[in-house]
Image (cartoon, rainbow, N blue to C red):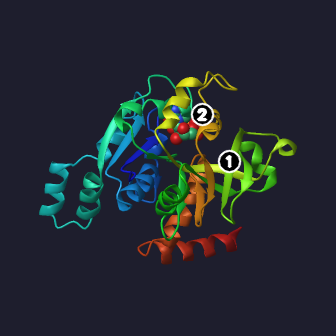
Amino acid sequence: MPVRTAVITAAGVGTRFLPISKSVPKEMLPLVDRPVLQYAVEQAAEAGIERVVLVTSRGKTAMEDYFDVAPELERTLRERGNAKLEPVEQAGRMTRIIAVRQPEPLGLGHAVLMAKEAVGNEPFIIYLPDEILLGEPSVTRQMLDAYERRGNAIGVVEVPWDDVSRYGVVEGEPLSDRETRLTRSVEKPPRDEAPSNLAIVGPYVFSPAIFGCLEEITTGAIGELQLTDAIALLAQREPVHAYRFEGERFDAGTPLGLMQTAVEIALRRPDYADEMRAWIKELAARL
Ligand code: UTP
């Protein structure tokens, strides 16, 4: 069955972005001139995903508004012949958004479970919006292909061993250069207990069996419903494999990471690259 639904979990508190995330969802912070959230939505739409289930929480309606049409704004821009009309129209017509709420931030696993009814009994892809993944073919395309080949697929990257304690880490048998049959994943292990340096960053492509696993697990390590625990259970029932995708990965989930990601993206944008490069050189000379 083809994957036609994406789930984007965007109901977290965004503690690392306080105080701005008090009133601006961290997913709406800008990478150049578009919100962090757009990168996942755009990639899903380009890969032929028909609808996006956005898991949100109170005070975050700006995310839904952004992907809705804006007739008055569009009319004004059209009358003025403004070049920004096209990106504004695009954002409003990119995909069908279905917003569901997570009433309390009870963890990533709990957020995914909130999408169960909207997804239905079919496979789906999950994005963590902070993870900006650039690849050619797109990381989404690579993950959907990985799912077609072997079933449940989890996007991973190699990270320095000193960083493994910040991630969910893969344990399993290598199947090929890029694929590992997963037996277990370990959430934020200390460096010397980590089974590998393959960090789970998503996207994840799962059969709907993951929902049953989420319902079965009780609260995990820090009182939240952990997706990694549900994946471990799923791996006992169906093959799950970690796929080390080809591409670049930027973490826009911290203030420093967001600033670095914005610069990296500006350097890839024809409309900003030259000025950005010139400024970075001039800045470097002053440091
Ligand atoms: P994070 O661990 O980055 O948490 O969640 P966070 O709240 O977004 O940010 P910090 O750590 O407080 O700064 C990983 C992903 O899971 C979602 C987040 O929105 C993010 O996309 N999430 C997390 C939820 O949707 N609900 C939750 O209860 C927890």
Q: Residues within 10 Å of mark 2 (few under 14, many from 20)?
A: many
The foreground one among 169 and 24 is: 169
Reply above or below: 90 against 167: below
Q: Residues within 10 Å of mark 1 (few under 14, many from 20)?
A: many
Question: Residue 247 location in percent, x, y?
Answer: 58, 66
> Which quadrant would residue 226 be assigned to in this image?
top right
What residue is shown at x 23% (from left), y 62% (from top)? 85
Q: Quadrant of ligand 1?
A: top right
- Split into 4 quadrants, where in the image is the C terminus? bottom right
Reply above or below: 284 against 212: below
Q: Amino acid at mark 2?
A: Ala
Reply above or below: 48 against 29: below
The foreground one among 6 and 215 is: 215
> Which quadrant would residue 39 be assigned to in this image?
bottom left
Question: Residue 248 location in percent, x, y?
Answer: 59, 64
Can residue 21 be seen in the rendering of this structure? Answer: no
Residue named by callout 2: 230
User: Would residue 240 be found to the left or right of residue 187 on screen?
Assistant: left
Residue named by callout 1: 182
Question: Residue 25 location in percent, x, y?
Answer: 45, 38
Residue 269 numbered mark, or none: none
All told, the count of numbered labels is 2
Kindly tell me whether mark 2's CB lies below 8 Å from ligand 1: no
Badge 2 marks a residue whose secondary structure is helix
